[in-house]
Amino acid sequence: MTAKNLPKDFAKDAPAKTPKNKTKDKYRCNWCTGSDLYENYHDQEWGVPLKDPEALFKLLILEGMQAGLAWITVLNKREYMHKLFFGFDMSKVAAATPGDVESWLLDAGIIRHRGKLNAMIGNAQSALDIQDFSGFLWQFAPPKLRTNKNFDVPAQTDESNLMSKALKAKGFRFVGPTICYAFMQSAGMVNDHHPDCWRYSDCQKLLKAALAKT
């Protein structure tokens, strides 16, 4: 989910209260309210540190798929795309053929964009050339936790710019600095939950532990 899709008042307003599920009495970041799918993603995934290279590759591809679209579109299609794109297995995606792309473009269950599909294949090939893909990505995580409770959520940062440049140098596409920062948010390399959100403290602890092992 890109930072540009967050509401302008994200940093100012307290997270919204919602009656949707078992966490109904807890406060959430207000960008995720109004949809069970969004809320579950927020509660279970967003901001939780990922170190598994296959999981990181999948997330990077999905963030690139979102370019020009709403993140909810990706969430609605990702389960089907996971099945169609070989479980986002890097070796299998890297071996996909032009014929696969033509077939995918006929499937309304995915995000049908030739450039993004070709980029996914090329990105898989590039990722396989990196010996420690997880370590390569995590080197760009800010080394210090942000503790300021009156923060604005940026669209990109110095770290995301460096990640973008490094990925592009390796041959990756659809990895601009805004996409990279959204990826860093989702992958838990930064904790951009609102300080009043019920997930903030847990994700802060998880990020601290992840950085200690980086």
Image: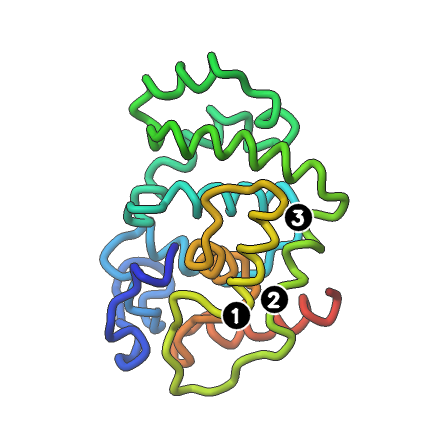
* Residue 177 x %, y %: 46, 58
**Contact (CB < 8 A) between labels 3 and 1?**
no
Q: In 3D space, how far apart are the residues under numbered discs 2 and 1 (Cα atoms)?
A: 10 Å
The residue positioned 37% from the left and 78% from the top of the image is 152
- Residue 45 visible in the snapshot: no
Q: Quadrant of residue 90?
A: top right
Q: In 3D space, how far apart are the residues under numbered discs 2 and 3 (Cα atoms)?
A: 15 Å
The residue furthest top is 99
Vertical placement of 28 versus 118: above or below? below
- Three-letter code, disc 2: Ala
Q: Secondary structure at mark 2?
A: loop
Who comes first in sequence, dot 2 or dot 1? 2
Q: Secondary structure at mark 3?
A: loop
Q: Which residue is mark 1?
A: 158
* Residue 188 x %, y %: 54, 62
- Residue 150 visible in the snapshot: yes
Q: In 3D space, how far apart are the residues under numbered discs 3 and 1 (Cα atoms)?
A: 24 Å
Q: Which residue is mark 2?
A: 141
Vertical placement of 122 versus 75: above or below? above
Q: Secondary structure at mark 1?
A: helix
Instruction: Specify whether 155 is left or right of 16.
Output: right
Q: Which residue is mark 3?
A: 52
Mark 1 neighbour class, 10 Å CA radius: few under 14, some 14 to 19, many 20 or more: few
